[in-house]
Amino acid sequence: MKKILVANRGEIALRIMRTIRRMGIRSVAVYSEADRNSPHVFFADEAVCLGPAPSTQSYLNADKIIAFANELGVDGIHPGYGFLSENAEFAKLTEKAGIIFIGPGPDAMRIMGSKLAAKECVKKYGIPMVPGTDKAIEDIDVAKKIAAEIGYPVLIKASAGGGGKGMRIVEKATDLEEQMQRAVSEARSSFGDGSVFIEKYISSPRHIEIQVLADNYGNTIHLFERECSIQRRHQKVVEESPSSVLTPELRKKMGEAAVMVATSCNYRSTGTVEFLLDDKLNFYFLEMNTRLQVEHPVTEMITGIDLVEEQIKIARGEKLGFTQDDLSVNGHSLELRVYAEDPSNDFLPSTGTLTKYIRPQGEGIRVDDGYEEGMTIPVYYDPMIAKLVTHGKDRASAIQKMKEAIRNYKIEGVITTLSFGLFVLEHDAFLSGKFDTQFIEKHYIPSKLAPTQKQNAELAAIIALKYWLDKQKEIKPVEATPTNWTIRLTENN
Ligand code: ADP
């Protein structure tokens, strides 16, 4: 491969291009009008504008991306994550145009893109699954019967769901009908597919996922786990590897199960098999993500393997250069997703311009970002500014580095999740490793957040005002003394 087009934006486009350059390959960036001045555009060897800001007119325009790739003599397309990365049709069109899709084959993507088809596919391998239905449910009476058998609370899920959307917890039978109607209409509008199914709602599970890597020659291995239980709205904010709850035996067992899931759909490239782990350390298959995951850097930090490089090598037909036995966990790594969101206001997006933007630096600190000072966070896309990653010899040192890095990350102009990250890292539940996906509901107290840059600025303004008012009081007695000058003024009036 001589030239790769990265069909994405922001931090992930930049991160992929860095590896492409290191491998001596040329890179092509695509961008929307809103991203004209983004770092990924300047970093690439060539760049083409896809069109207006909305994703449907830019980053999701498969035909246009492939047409540009052809025009520019591109021989590989890397889709990153999000946008077209899990679109089997895009993968197919790419290959049809004679360009290599850097990812899995379209069939594996299609199977794993549907949570129901995925369950069906892995069933014969004896992988433990969350109790529930393995078919789409349309009839409310059938749904009621199944929910009663499983036992409340249950979770209604969209088969085509992703990003934590299309999920509804139902606590009691009387709520089922209404929640099901809502779930179907949400699934239809968000994913164009109204199929929903029912799962037992596992109370207080941990989200543990396994990174897998597979080549075209039947070699499939795993790169250990990522603990992703700190979530808001069923979406991850803090991730780490290794997980403090996995024993070597459980790690091996879950790793082998993940390899089996990948094998079940003839997987190639990088992929992630997601599991829920209950409080008795039983694990259940959730789904497989057929792409590079946002949180992949923690795995890179503890294994020393560049996952994008592996994706490219596999795509150009190379065999994996190492085996399962060659891999081991080196130290500990943490990732904090730095979102332009207000953690004191239900994590609502905080849009604006980065009036100050200074990255933390130091040994064991990695910042994957796609912004510079002065840039505005576009409202059209995911509000993630950066991924702050640390690596230390053990968990305590990775945590210490992350705390230091958060304090040295200077972001002004938008509110971010940095203060939330600090709250998590200082909380006993996190420090002791005894936490689950309900961390926010159980432990989070927004008023305990360290003051944000904005609050600090407001505080400084109040102090300055108070100082000025005090000064005014001090000079008042002088003003009160009658002088000729003031008398004359009065006379003139
Ligand atoms: P998505 O594809 O939308 O990301 P997932 O199936 O991966 O959905 O689940 C996302 C998160 O939702 C999980 O990490 C977990 O916190 C929660 N979740 C999913 N299924 C269940 C379940 N059966 N019981 C409890 N929590 C669940």
Image: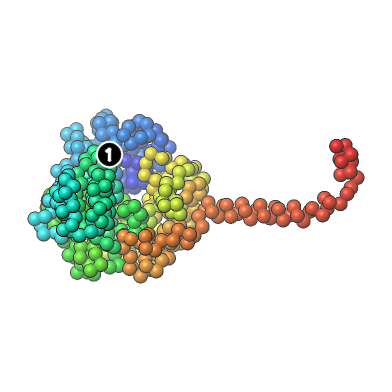
Q: Is residue 408 above or below residue 73?
A: below
What is the three-letter code of the residue carrying label 1?
Ser
Q: How far across and down, in percent of the image, does residue 209 sit?
A: 25, 58
**Viewer-proximal residue among 224 and 40:** 224
Q: How far across and down, in percent of the image, does residue 356 sit?
A: 51, 48
Relative placement, left or right, of 365 versus 151 is right
Q: Quadrant where the N terminus lies?
A: top left
- Name the image quarter holding residue 64: top left
For disc 1, the marked residue is 189
The residue located at (20%, 65%) in the rendering is 282
Q: Does residue 405 appear in the picture of this structure?
A: no
Q: Is residue 351 above or below residue 54?
A: below
Q: How far across and down, in percent of the image, does residue 322 sit?
A: 19, 58
* Dot 1: element: helix
The residue located at (27%, 54%) in the rendering is 169
- Name the image quarter holding residue 241: bottom left
Q: Quadrant of ligand 1?
A: bottom left
Relative placement, left or right, of 117 versus 297 is left
Q: Residue most toward the left?
A: 124
Q: Residue most toward the right?
A: 484
Q: Does residue 278 appear in the picture of this structure?
A: yes
Relative placement, left or right, of 227 versus 412 is left
